[in-house]
Image (tube, rainbow, N blue to C red):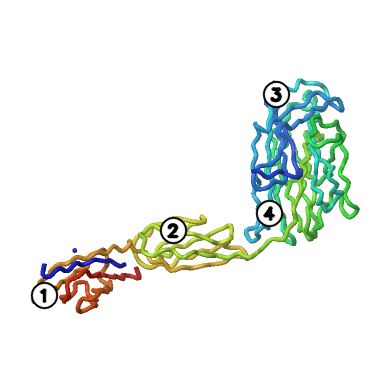
Amino acid sequence: MKRFFTLLIITCSVLVSHATHIVGGDIHYEYLGNDEYKIILRVYRDCGTSSTNFDNVADVALYLGTDLQFTIPMNLSDATTSFLPIDTGDPCLDPPEGLCVAEAIYEETVTIPYQAGTFHLAYQRCCRNTTLVNCESNDDIGMTVTTQIPDQVVYGENSAPNFTNFPPVVICLNEPFAFDHSATEPDGDSLVYTLCNPLLTNVAGFEINTPGPPPYPQLEFYPEYNYNYPIDSDPAFAIDPETGLLTGTPIQLGQYVIGICVEEWRDGELISTTNRDFQFNIAPCSQDIVANIPPEEPCTGLEVTFDNSSNGELFSWDFGIDELESDTSDIMEPVFTYPDSGQYTVTLIVNPGFPCADTASMDLLIYEPLEVDFEMIDDYCEDGVRSFIFQGNGNYTGTAEFSWDFQDGLPTFDDAETTDWISYDDPGMYDVTLTVEDHDC
């Protein structure tokens, strides 16, 4: 810390990027009573850095058998849109840059008067990506997502299964993958999960105003693939029929379309099948995890806001107080207040407990900011020579070191808190500087 003083001597007298392709979706419903149903449609699309180009009105068709009952217009203005997180599910793996998928959740409450038979709800949209690896990828191949409302007199009231988690955008090449693809439903029915064939549209067009009736055409895989082996993988992708856990290890880069179905069983009878259609991106993922704590300015007080320029996902901080076990944090950039001044060693572990864990440490000086001043405490004038004594002031401790610079005064230097007599032979203006160092502050 330096303090300057100018001395005057007078003789003995101071978004908008557009979405490009559909990449998946699913539909389910909740029975509200009195023939009212809430229809929930989820649609996934490629996206850019800002907004996406979902249907302004997404039309869902209601069929009884093959007879259209009515369409349900679902407005984008009432929907919830968001970008899906690009998460590999493994903190040791960083996905490549540039991946982006957006989700729109449309909702609409409708009255469906009872009629004998099974109702079908369907949404259709073109077009899939032209870069798909496991099937023909012309720019006119669309998607159908569907579910059924079983006969209420035969089976009772029903709400469809609802997939709990959104699907992952990226799966890392050559890394074991596991994803909870389970669903919930409130009626106590048994749910069975299967890999199934993605469905195509049976109506031409891009934004399909009236989806076509069931049954729906199935996507045709290339010969080396099928709905049970949709991705180059070893072990092959499989889904647990009871838990919905999807597992496998991809061995080839690319974009793959996959179908997941959840069957709803009641009293031993299949009453509905809900499909989810999604495109998985198999990509190389970096494993270069580096822990890094940027240097903190010393002597700024007892409270410290720590910066963190590490690239991991999980963090374990130890703020270096030997007698405490509670001086820890697991947030990315914590704020910590030290109980006393001193020197501490701060340790950060990134992704603790994982093979890619990395550690960084930093010595930190915890002291209040050093505030220094000085004053002239005595002076006299003799034979035209003016002499002064200066004294330092501040919040430094007894270990502080002092360095004075008196410009043309004699002596020109002093290292005590209170100086000897400093004399100036000639009148003029002189700079006096005091530098104090205390605990490296």
| Contact between labelled residues 1 and 4, with CB atoms less than 8 Å apart | no
Residue type, numbered disc 3: Glu
For label 2, the SS is loop
Image quarter of the N terminus: bottom left
Local packing at callout 2 (Cα closer than 10 Å; few below 14, some 14-19, many 20+) is: few
Circle 3/circle 4 CB separation < 8 Å: no
Q: Mark 4 points at which residue?
A: 98
Q: What element carries label 3?
A: strand
Q: In this view, does 232 lie above or below 342?
A: above
Q: How far apart are marks 3 and 2 (CA)?
A: 53 Å
- Report if the CB atoms under discs 3 and 2 are less than 8 Å apart: no
Q: Name the front one of labels 4 and 2.
A: 4
Relative image position of residue 116 (x, y in whole percent): 82, 22
Labelled disc at residue 36: 3
Q: Distance between the residues labelled 3 and 4?
A: 42 Å
Q: Mark 1 points at which residue?
A: 384
Helix, strand or loop status at disc 4 = loop
How many residues crowd around disc 1 within 10 Å: few (fewer than 14), some, or many (20 or more)? some
Q: In which quarter of the image is the C terminus?
A: bottom left
Residue type at tag 1: Gly
Q: Closer to the observer: label 4 or label 1?
A: 1
Question: Residue 18 placed where, x, y %?
Answer: 70, 43
Disc 4 marks a residue whose amino acid type is Gly
What whole-number distance in Å separates the C-alpha atoms at marks 4 and 1? 78 Å
Closer to us: 335 or 411:
411
Which residue lies most toward the left here?
A: 382
Query: Which comes before the other along the chain, label 2 or label 1?
Result: 2
Query: Alpha-carbon distance for marks 4 and 2?
Result: 40 Å
For marks 3 and 2, the one nearer the N-term is 3
Q: Distance between the residues labelled 3 and 1?
A: 105 Å
Quadrant for residue 117, please give it.
top right
